[in-house]
Image (cartoon, rainbow, N blue to C red):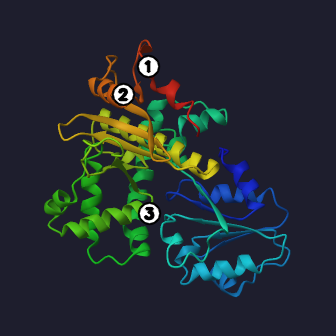
Amino acid sequence: MRRKQIDQIIKDLEKKMVFLVGPRQVGKTWLSREIGKHFNHPTYLNYDRVEDRQIIKQEAWLKDTDLLILDELHKMRGWKNYLKGVFDTRVPTLRILVTGSARLNTFRQAGDSLAGRFFVHRLLPFSLAELKGIGKEIKIDKLINQSGFPEPLLADTTEEADRWRSQYIDGLIRTDVLDFETVHNLRAVQMVFDLLRRRVGSPVSFSSLAEDIQIAPATAKRYVGILEALFIVFRVSPYSRNIARSILKEPKIYFFDTGLVMGDDGARFENFIAVSLLKQAWAKSDVIGKKYEVGYLRTKEGKETDFVLIENDEAVELIEAKLSDGDLSRNLRYFSGKYDIQGIQIVKELKREKSFSGLDIVKAENYLENLFL
């Protein structure tokens, strides 16, 4: 299936390098090859392949290459300075696309040697909005249960999707984690991963997580950071600007693959909403250039909204995710009224949409299909 970001990426390649990053098996290699079809002489090189690694190190790709695709290049020692040299000395007709399954946080550290030389595009699982944009109709239940990753999404049965997920988990823990950083206690990483699967939607205390596994809180936080860096999980942090009583510091942790959630239907639906909102925020940030984020609100008295959409550090929309509750959330009403922020309650199973003085109760499909991406 065609990815909606392809046109913007091709446009950006005319100006700078493009970094295409996202979770493992989300479709980065497929998309990079599709982009290659728009060029006369594309060259795809994967640093994980021994043959390609030598070509990369020797800069021995064919001279007529007009699109150079470098996959998993961040695994190469000194890759930032290498890439800076390639970009700064390239022939005018050469475009460069770099792909990988690790976050770019580390890319931007250690001297900013690549500053001003690249655009970032983050590729996430398919959403209802993206599927609608390319003319594909897939029910929300299938996206929740099988996830928006291409292979399980297109699987004919949930059993096929589950088989893919079993292999996917094994690859994440045993291969990606060890490739990314030295870890002496892989079993503890697995335990952190398993506990997070059961705590989706609840604030996560690193001290509590550490106590359950019998490791230091700093180690638990580091392991969660590794899972984040590899696009396995993402955090939604409490928003506090101009809302003095939202003092809770613990983040909520969600999975890019909704199928990994081990909870009730409510937890899986909330995770699906979280992925959809994050996909929109990141896509808008990557394309528009403004700062878009997803957070949540919670006071010390326990009042909470599931999500708050943030634009340039200002809260612009409050969101509650409900499976079937057609009654307006008291907490949504409270926060919206107190801080004058628009509120929307997204309901998966809803007979009729309603509005209450600026607060809307809407069907999940109707809201999600009209997101930015």
> Helix or strand or loop: what does disc 3 sit on?
loop
- Dot 3 corresponds to which residue? 230
Q: Position of residue 71 (x, y in %)?
A: 61, 69
Q: Is residue 172 above or below residue 59?
A: above
- 169 left or right of 97? left
Judge depth for marks 1 and 3 and give the one in front. Answer: 1
Q: Is residue 212 left or right of residue 26?
A: left
Q: Residue at x 52, y 24 (%)?
A: 366
Other-residue count near label 3 (Cα within 10 Å), few / some / many at <14 / 14–19 / ≥20:
many
Neighbourhood count class around disc 1 (C-alpha, 10 Å): few under 14, some 14–19, many 20 upward? few
Earlier in the chain: of badge 1 and badge 2, it is 2
x and y, in percent, of residue 363 in the image: 45, 22
> Do the residues bearing badges 1 and 2 touch, measured as CB atoms within 8 Å?
yes
Residue at image x 23%, y 39%?
299
Q: Quadrant of the N terminus?
A: top right
Residue position marked by numbered label 2 in the rendering: 336
The residues bearing labels 1 and 3 have C-alpha atoms spaced at a distance of 39 Å
For mark 1, what is the residue?
A: 358
Label 3 or label 2, whichever comes before in sequence order: 3
Q: Secondary structure at mark 2?
A: helix
Q: What amino acid type should be assigned to the residue bearing mark 1?
A: Gly
Q: Residue at x 26, y 52 (%)?
A: 249
122 versus 86 height, above or below:
above
Front-lying residue, 96 or 317 = 317
- Against 200, is 335 above or below? above
- Residue type at the position of mark 3: Leu
Q: Nearer the viewer, mark 3 or mark 2?
A: 2
Q: Quadrant of residue 185?
A: bottom left
